[in-house]
Image (spheres, rainbow, N blue to C red):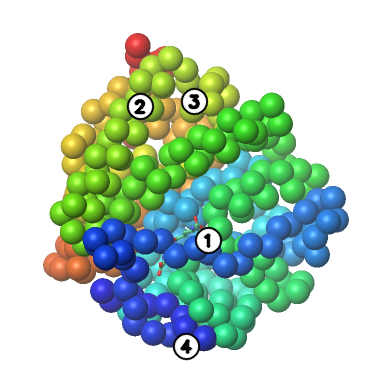
Amino acid sequence: MPTGMLINGEWRKEGYQKDSDGRFLRNPTTFRNWIKADGSSNFLPEVGRYHLYVSLACPWAHRVLIMRKLKGLEDAISLSIVDPYMGEEGWHFSEEAGTIPDPIFGATYLREIYIKADPNYTGRVTVPVLWDKKTGTIVNNESRELLRMLDHEFQDIATKKDNYCPPELKSTIEKIIDEIYNPINNGVYRAGFAQSQVAYEEAVTELFNALNHWETVLGKQLYLCGEEITEADWCLFATLLRFDAVYYVHFKCNLHRIMDYPNLSRYLLDLYNQPGVKDTCNFDHIKQHYYRSHPHINPSGIVPVGPAFPLSNTKAASKPHQ
Ligand SMILES: N[C@@H](CCC(=O)N[C@@H](CS)C(=O)NCC(=O)O)C(=O)O
């Protein structure tokens, strides 16, 4: 598999991990510091202090990019966007349309940022990454935690104050983010990167059972936790957005498309049309990344032309279908 990871600070060609039955295993992220507005950590929310590295292709990075937008933190947290192609050298910076090079180190590869934070780093070089310019390290590279930090810890700095994890819904939101992670968010990867028929079928079955469940729930309410948009919705949105264009074809998640589900389509379109959100969606980067970066799945590297994307040209129902 033509990708790599850092081992004691050295770049090694290394595929994704799998178990003895061919199931894809995701490596845990290692930078897990928290920015705290109450001063209980060394990382305080400050304008201009932090820099976010993302890929527009990556659903995990996309959640964080969306929250930066929704909270109006664009001037407070600067941004780099890697090239969509991830080859043998991992994520890299380029001059391609839609990318933003690294203004801090002028890095060629994202792995340079990991090595700056820890010269002996061992692990995968993933996006998103939040860099602290003040202490010169990576604060955190786990999207779920970054999503919460941008939502809550920058409240004084944020120019838009909507809260996507209100206290009365917090436990429901956590539960739903947990519930959708394995079958859906990670489920598409478990299907796509499965290395045995059994592992693939297990992942696809769990994925569509979960999609069917949420299709029913969204027949009765607007969003995952009820009538207001929460962090859980942004976690699901990033996966649904990529589904028909990529996961259906490339990861063989082809029992149904999202557009075959009336409620999931209505929901996807609703979230896509929330102010600012479509600015964070780049189907060119999404398709270029997946179809070109996994030659073990798509050896020709040909990027499919379709779908004739429904998000921009069909009107989905604005109310749940029972
Ligand atoms: N648990 C991480 C996962 C991030 C992740 O796996 N990102 C992918 C892109 S979609 C990546 O950078 N992969 C590079 C690699 O594994 O080498 C998070 O949610 O932030």
Residue 115 higher or lower than 19, as above or below: below
Q: Residue at x 64, y 28 (%)?
A: 169
As helix, strand or loop, the secondary structure at mark 4 comes to strand
Cα–Cα span, label 3 and label 4: 44 Å
Mark closer to the observer (2, 1): 2
Cα–Cα span, label 1 and label 4: 21 Å
Residue 86 falls in image quadrant: bottom left
Q: Which mark is residue 213?
A: 2
Q: Residue at x 51, y 35 (%)?
A: 176
* Sooner in the amino-acid sequence: mark 2 or mark 1: 1
Which kind of residue does numbered mark 3 sit on? Tyr
Left or right: 49 with respect to 26? right
Task: Please say if the residues under marks 2 and 3 sit with CB atoms less than 8 Å apart.
Answer: no
As helix, strand or loop, the secondary structure at mark 1 comes to loop
- Residue identifier under label 4: 10
- Residue identifier under label 1: 128
The verdict on label 4 being within 8 Å of ligand 1 is: no
- Residue identifier under label 3: 223
Which kind of residue does numbered mark 4 sit on? Glu
Residue 27 x, y percent position in the rendering = 44, 65
Task: Please say if the residues under marks 2 and 1 sit with CB atoms less than 8 Å apart.
Answer: no
Residue 51 higher or lower than 258, as above or below: below
Mark closer to the observer (3, 4): 4
* Sooner in the amino-acid sequence: mark 3 or mark 1: 1
Residue 130 x, y percent position in the rendering = 62, 63
- Ligand 1 is found in the corner quadrant, namely bottom left
Left or right: 308 with respect to 120? left
* Sooner in the amino-acid sequence: mark 3 or mark 4: 4
* Sooner in the amino-acid sequence: mark 2 or mark 3: 2
As helix, strand or loop, the secondary structure at mark 3 comes to loop
* Sooner in the amino-acid sequence: mark 1 or mark 4: 4
The verdict on label 1 being within 8 Å of ligand 1 is: yes
